[in-house]
Image (tube, rainbow, N blue to C red):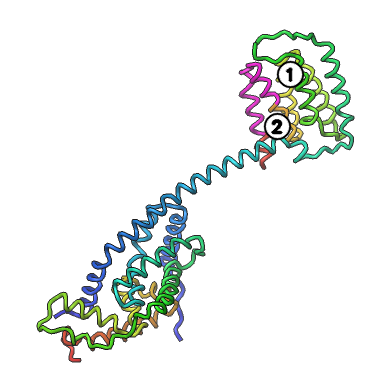
Amino acid sequence: MDVIAGPTLSHQTETQRLNQLFRRVADGDERAFRELYEEVSRPLLAYCLSFTRDMDDARDLFQHTMAAVFEHRNRYRYENLMGWIFTIARNAGRSWEHKAKRFETLDTDPWDEIETDPLEASETTELVQRSILDLPEEFRTVILLRYFGEMSIRDIAESEGITESLVKVRLFRARERLSVALGPLIGHSS
Amino acid sequence: MKSLDDLLRDASADWLQQARPTLVETADELAGQLRPTRWHRLAMGGVSVAAVIGAAWWLLSQTPSVQEPPRMTVQAQVQTPVATQVQQNRVDAPDAAPSTSPTRPSAKDATASVESEMPTQLMADGTVDGFTAEYERVLARAMQFESTDPLRAANEYLGLGRLCLVRKQWAHAASALQRSEELARRGQFLHLMPEIQRQLAIAQQRLRN
């Protein structure tokens, strides 16, 4: 059974720093808001993308979530900021998912629509993106948070409420799947 | 041929590029909402401070009856001799009291003011520890001089305020000092003002605590 290690001093300090920033935002400090936004926007967008699997929809969900965070800022208990923001995003994403019913699994092979060889850079990028978004949700989320959201293993674990070991396992398996899917691009046979 | 890490980073960079306008737009929109919030908070803070000051002022003006209810059962016992003295002053004082300033009130006005305000504002404490007797004595003297010698009356009220401060009768002290301040301002006794205001500030501070 995985056990989450106790938070290090630097991690606690980081949490406190974010909480202090958020407190200033709640008091109407625009500069603090900009600073905090810089820190949370990318992980949140990555998280939204893991739900919607489409960047346009992810941007909508991101805006919706940020507005909700802003609106309910006085309800925050000053514990785990990213976890709280992700919870809001998750709730918004789930309800939106039910309404939109637009996140069916892609049933086409990403390679089917790629016609030319060698691939152009934009096509390669698109192929990688589609491969990521095709991953099962638990793998997709950790890959997006780690690479697009640039979050640390510890922060992902804390935000998702899982152990660091589980994050590492999911990352490993996600990378395995991507290596298979993108084999021709990275010299692996599929 | 790139590594998987490089491909993942390229894909992330491309997504970020696509999302950048949204990120900027959202930040600006929310920051815009923050500005009125801040002004609203500042305004509300100002209103709150004004309300607190107003409430404190009202409390101070009500202190003897609201914060420190008289311990004496029959207030008339205190009022009677003073009222008699005031009445006596009214008889003794000339109708047109010597006036050094056109803004100074006439003796009749001052007497009426004393009769209407002082008994309810200052005359209250009926304890038997010696304070009451001295308090009443100084108060009666101050009231007596209000019409004939406002400078001395202001000094008497200042002394009464000091006495009340020493005896920790904050509400009475504040009332006496406010009276002293009023007389000093009316008579333009500016040299008294700093000391009166210093003592009054102490009394008000104690009342707040």
Classed neighbour count for the residue bearing mark 1: other residues with Cα under 10 Å, few (<14), some (14–19), many (≥20): many
> Is residue A114 part of the magenta span, yes or no?
no
Amino acid type of the residue tagged 2 in the rendering: Ala
Magenta stretch bounds: B179-202
| In the depicted structure, whether residue A31 falls above or below residue B62 | below
> Circle 2 marks a residue in which chain?
B
- Residue A38: horizontal and vertical position, in percent? 33, 61
Number of the label disc, if any, that sits on residue B201? none
| In the depicted structure, whether residue A136 falls above or below residue B63 | below
- Residue A6: horizontal and vertical position, in percent? 46, 74
| In the depicted structure, whether residue B86 falls above or below residue B28 | above
Number of the label disc, if any, that sits on residue B174? 2
Q: Is residue B54 left or right of residue A130?
A: right
> Is residue B183 part of the magenta span, yes or no?
yes
Q: Do pointers 1 and 2 mark residues of a single chain?
A: yes
B73 vs A161, nearest the viewer:
B73
Please tell me which residue is depicted at 23% across the width and 86% down the height of the picture. Answer: A179
Gap in angstroms between the C-alphas marked 1 and 2: 16 Å
Q: Secondary structure beneath disc 1? A: helix
Residue that numbered label 1 is attached to: B153
Picture quarter containing residue A93?
A: bottom left
Amino acid type of the residue tagged 1 in the rendering: Ala
Classed neighbour count for the residue bearing mark 2: other residues with Cα under 10 Å, few (<14), some (14–19), many (≥20): many
| In the depicted structure, whether residue B106 falls above or below residue B52 | above
